[in-house]
Amino acid sequence: MAELVRVVVDAMGGDNAPVEPVKGAVQAVMERKDIQVILTGPKDVIEKELQKYPDCPKDRVQVVHASEVIETAEPPVFAIRKKKDSSIVVGLNMVKHQEADAFVSSGSTGAVLVGGQVLVGRSKGVERPPLAPLIPTKDGVSLLIDCGANVDARPSHLVQFAKMGSIYMENVVGVKNPRVAIVNNGAEEEKGNALVKETFPLLKECEGINFIGSIEARDIPAGYADVIVCEAFVGNVILKLYEGVGATLIEKIKGGMMSSFRSKIGALLVKPALKATLKTFDASEHGGAPLLGLKGLVVKTHGSAVAVEIKNAIFQCVQFKQQKINEKIAERLN
């Protein structure tokens, strides 16, 4: 029997807690036998939610009581220090003390980022852990690194992001010799702001990565690069615009198909193919964004995450653990 991967899920994190985190956790253990899920939060609340799933394998679902919840609006550093019995802090401490292999949360992004660095800790050699989600492209996925953790990054940070992103794409996604590009406002090497101009030659000279130069935002959905390097302000803008445009297009397509009797007939004919295509552009299908470069695995999902995203984030943790990504990052950066 395969070794169990122990994943802590913050049952009180996000807009849909505890319903969706618990549902996603249950779905994960029911679909795979190599997972043990540990739910953190008020024990009575979680156990009441678990009663909805009588077929759930109880031996692989554990509840660890946490009496406090960190709200999204709370200052992250203050919240991590003061709410030591929160579902986030309790879960992160379990990873820190190796009582669990990974932590998944839809809660406060700031608290997860601060807690990940302060409690779990950075791997030796890592200057700044980046948040790195997989984003859908025409032919598959690309890794956007960083999308929210380091808004004032230095060139040396971006070089490390490129190395960590390459390891992730090769070992988790299975892309051999992944193409690395830096986000720029033009394809020419001399373009860009001070950060990009200083980082470009460092990436060009960096051994062990397949650097292909600059990438403009319009070329990201076409999948021109596998690892897209940027500092967190730019990355977060790209991610949010990506999600917003995607949601708007889907809404417009659905509206157009329902606009007349003829279009409704056409919609019935193309529905299976269209549904399959749109599913590939659904961010929830790719799990959450791992905070790379820590001593343990921390994954942040959307605040509005539903069960399928939580489930896929848990599966993501299993692959991350099995492929020893933390060890490979630490070895590469040292």
Image: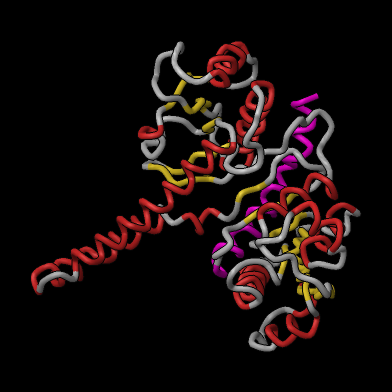
Q: Tell me, yes or no, whether the highlighted magenta stretch contains residue 326.
A: yes
Residue 255 visible? The answer is: yes
- Seen from the viewer's position, the closer of residues 45 and 79 is 79
- Seen from the viewer's position, the closer of residues 14 and 96 is 14
Q: Coloured how?
A: secondary structure
**Can you say whether 232 is above or below 278 in the image?**
above
Quarter holding residue 229: top right
Quarter holding residue 265: bottom left
Most extreme residue toward the left is 262
Q: Tell me, yes or no, whether the highlighted magenta stretch contains residue 296.
A: no
Most frequent secondary structure within the magenta stretch: helix
Q: Which residue shows up at 75% across the image and 34% down it?
A: 328
Quarter holding residue 188: top left
- Seen from the viewer's position, the closer of residues 195 and 267 is 195
Mark count: 0
**Can you say whether 107 is above or below 242 in the image?**
below
Q: Which residue shows up at 36% across the image and 36% down it?
A: 222
x and y percentages locating residue 59 in the rendered image? 80, 77
Most extreme residue toward the right is 97
Q: Which residues are magenta?
A: 306-334
**Can you say whether 247 is above or below 271 in the image?**
above
Residue 4 visible? The answer is: no
Q: Which residue shows up at 61% across the image and 49% down it?
A: 289
x and y percentages locating residue 274 in the rendered image? 28, 60
Quadrant where the N terminus is found in the figure: bottom right
x and y percentages locating residue 251 in the rendered image? 30, 63
x and y percentages locating residue 334 in the rendered image? 81, 24
